Amino acid sequence: MSDTSGRIVGQVAEDIGVEADDICSCIITSGAVTLQQSLVLNLEDQVRWAMESELATATIAPDMLSYIYPAPLDAVDPDRVTLIR
């Protein structure tokens, strides 16, 4: 199997309208699709920053894990999901 992570990063970046260099390595891991706990921690940090900077109107941070649906990847290869649930 060839490593297509560069192509995948490029496609994701294009789809969400950012530069490929701005895609966090916790989102796309070279050679494999994974859902890592670091993704949730990163999202929580961003929400906390937005709230502290008064860029978000929420007063209570949302449960970021509730926005992630790991079931499809769990079904294919549960070892690739390291989310603490």
Image (cartoon, rainbow, N blue to C red):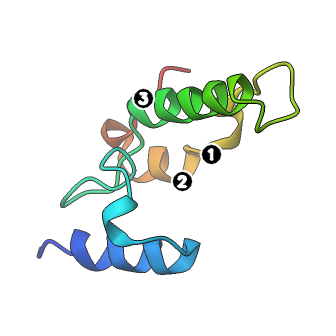
Question: Callout 1: few (<14), some (14-19), or many (20+) C-alpha neighbours within 10 Å?
Answer: few
- Which labelled disc corresponds to residue 69? 1
Quadrant assignment, res 43: top right
* Mark in the foreground, 2 or 1: 1
Q: Amino acid at mark 3?
A: Gln
* Farthest residue, direction left: 2
Which residue is pictured at 38% across the width and 60% down the height?
22
* Mark in the foreground, 3 or 2: 3
In-front residue for pair 65/70: 65
Which residue is pictured at 38% across the width and 59% down the height?
23
In-front residue for pair 58/8: 58
Residue 76: horizontal and vertical position, in percent? 41, 53
Assess whether mark 1 and mark 2 are in contact (beta carbons under 8 angstroms).
yes
Q: Which residue is mark 2?
A: 72
* Mark in the foreground, 3 or 1: 3
Q: Which residue is mark 3?
A: 37
- Measure the C-alpha gap from mark 3 to mark 1: 13 Å
Point out the tag, 3 or 1, that comes first from the N-terminus: 3
Q: Amino acid at mark 2?
A: Pro
Residue 35: horizontal and vertical position, in percent? 42, 42
Question: Callout 3: few (<14), some (14-19), or many (20+) C-alpha neighbours within 10 Å?
Answer: some
Q: Secondary structure at mark 3?
A: helix
- Measure the C-alpha gap from mark 2 to mark 1: 8 Å
Which residue is pictured at 57% across the width and 71% down the height?
16
In-front residue for pair 42/37: 42
